Amino acid sequence: MLLSKQKKNQAMKGNRFLISITVLGSAGPIRFVVNEEELVAAVIDTALKSYAREGRLPVLGSDLSNFVLYCPLAGMEGLGPWEMIGSLGVRNFMLCKKPQTEKVVDNEKSVTLARKGTGSWKAWFHKSLNLKVSSH
């Protein structure tokens, strides 16, 4: 009996590490400990619950399918929900809402348009690079 509890505790521990998730538009990052084998979808769910529990603004909602987790060091593509959080070896992430899509019906054709500028960290990053600092 005792041996099975020890094995269970060892299996649950795994390699754990502290991650930091910055939510676009929020005052500061959310930090919590995760197992390196935890799925990205579970990490997004935990981040949204922590964000809501702390009463942070702006209000995000709880539907994790509306969000994507980015790793700014790994490129411009978001992490897939079935990837393991420890697969990239990084600990800093950015949580953003997915771009909203609008359906436009034109002559019996349905076209889906992605809305730009709805809180994308990529747009913010590119805009900040274009700012010029004037010297006196």
Image (spheres, helix red, strand yellow):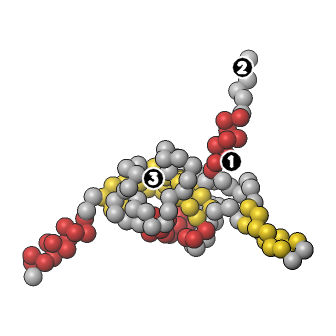
Residue toward you, 5 or 98: 98
In the picture of the structure, the residue carrying the numbered disc 2 is 135
In the picture of the structure, the residue carrying the numbered disc 1 is 123
Looking at this rendering, what residue extends furthest in the right direction?
107
Amino acid identity at mark 3: Ser
Amino acid identity at mark 1: Ala
State how far apart marks 2 and 3 are (Cα).
Answer: 34 Å
Residue found at x 37% / y 50%: 89
Residue toward you, 86 or 46: 86
Q: Please give left or right for residue 59 compared with residue 1 in the image.
A: right
Q: Which one is earlier in the sequence, the residue at label 2 or at label 3?
A: 3
Q: Quadrant of residue 26?
A: bottom right
State the quadrant of the N terminus. bottom left
Q: Please give left or right for residue 132 compared with residue 33 in the image.
A: right
Residue 39 location, x and y as percent?
41, 66
In the picture of the structure, the residue carrying the numbered disc 3 is 20
State how far apart marks 2 and 1 are (Cα).
Answer: 25 Å
Secondary structure beneath dot 2 equals loop
Residue found at x 64% / y 48%: 122
Question: Looking at the rendered structure, which numbered label has been put on residue 42?
Answer: none
